Amino acid sequence: MKRAALVIASLALAACTADVYTPRPKLEPHPLDPTNPENPAAPGVKKVTIPIADARAQVPAAEALAFARSVAPMLVGRALTPAERSELDAGGAVALRTMLERWVEEPAFAETARDFISVKLKASGASANLDGSLPGNLAAYLVKNKRPHAELITSPVCRDRMGTAIACDSGAPFGAGVLTTRVFLANNAGRFNLKRARTVLMTFACSDYPLTQALQPSLQRAQLIELFQNDKPPDGTSGAFGNGHACYTCHSQFGAHAQPFVKFDSDGRWQADATGLQLPGGEQGRSTGKLFTSHMADEAAAKSEASQYFGQPVADLAGEAKVLSEHPLYLECAVRSVFGYVLSLSGSEANALPYDVISEIVSEAKSREPEPSFARLVVEAFSHPSVVAAKRSP
């Protein structure tokens, strides 16, 4: 029987769905790697649980109504109808869950998905050079067609405004959903492809470097160019790139995640002849033309898109996206992110929501859809009793 974890970080939410509620001390933002012993799901963290259905039934109707009023404008772009208010008065959080199932079928919810992804990726509109609508188009299409949320980064094609399949505009011989749109690639272009790698990790795994070795094994020092083989230059200076400190610690992981971007130039176009080699006399991290330098010392490895992501070998960016989409962090991050978007939580607040609650929401979604859609994640997230009855900290 599924049980509701009746603990939410006081930093963002505090649950009150049962008489046996036990508050948790304020949490600092934490790495979301489930193997991290400081994760709120780790053994020794006290929590009080009761069955989800029982906890949902215990939420006072007034609290369910107040919660629904606050989220309806963001989820479906409107206020509650008189009939919906009456339904919530009578059925509380149990009625809210049924209502959410209806809401995600409304056309406005697909537009919410479009806006959510557009905001997350800072992509919208169109110019003479970039089509910023492609990420939002794909998100809306996936919702309308009840497709798995994983396809946001694994779809082999993009979509136009009407949902018709089109090639993603980077020109790559493969597709990786929004990751192979020029607006994403161009907006996140930077030396050594660091910004692209970090944006993917922060946006779709809600994590940042350095990662634990269990999650992302480091590349060997000998695999990297000399600049990143040491944590600090031998002469004790700050070095020629960045701050010069902890170079190997972070870049031994950065390098693995950045490598699949090696053939994408600063305009977001895929270039088959990219070498990944440093431009002689050029700024550190810049290769020929509009391309960026690889972390790899070996010339063959430098020009190859092959790498490893979360310890698994990948052939290119599509492979990286597949590994990421199949990792638990991907759906957990989607839930955190939609909470942040709808409830106006900061990134640190969303990332500090307890792993127990987030994991339970994902588990509920997967019990109904093995490959959950965005709509399924939203229904389970916004009907979870700990969330419905939560109070924002002052």
Image (cartoon, helix red, strand yellow):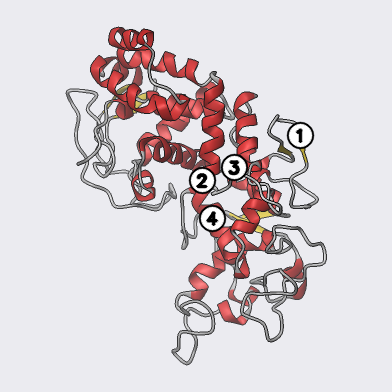
In front: label 1 or label 4 = 1
Q: Amino acid at mark 4?
A: Thr
In front: label 3 or label 1 = 1
- Residue 147 is left or right of residue 346, and the answer is right
Q: On the image, numbered disc 3 is attached to which residue?
A: 325
Secondary structure beneath dot 1 equals strand
Secondary structure beneath dot 2 equals helix
Measured as percent of width and height from the top left, residue 131 is found at 68, 47
Mark 2 and mark 4 in contact? Answer it, CB < 8 Å: no
Quadrant where the C terminus sits is: top left
Measured as percent of width and height from the top left, residue 99 is found at 43, 15
User: Label 3, label 4: how many angstroms apart (C-alpha)?
Assistant: 15 Å
User: Label 3, label 2: how many angstroms apart (C-alpha)?
Assistant: 17 Å
If you read the primary sequence from the N terminus, does the residue marked by circle 1 or circle 4 appear first? 1
If you read the primary sequence from the N terminus, does the residue marked by circle 2 or circle 1 appear first? 2
Identity of the residue drawn at 32% across and 44% down: 40
What is the residue that sits farthest to the front in this orientation? 128
Measured as percent of width and height from the top left, residue 79 is found at 39, 21
Q: On the image, numbered disc 2 is attached to which residue?
A: 120
In this rendering, the answer to whether 217 lies above or below 300 is above
**Can residue 125 be seen?**
yes
In this rendering, the answer to whether 191 lies above or below 241 is above
If you read the primary sequence from the N terminus, does the residue marked by circle 3 or circle 1 appear first? 1
Choose top left, top right, bottom left or bottom right for residue 344. top left
Q: On the image, numbered disc 4 is attached to which residue?
A: 199
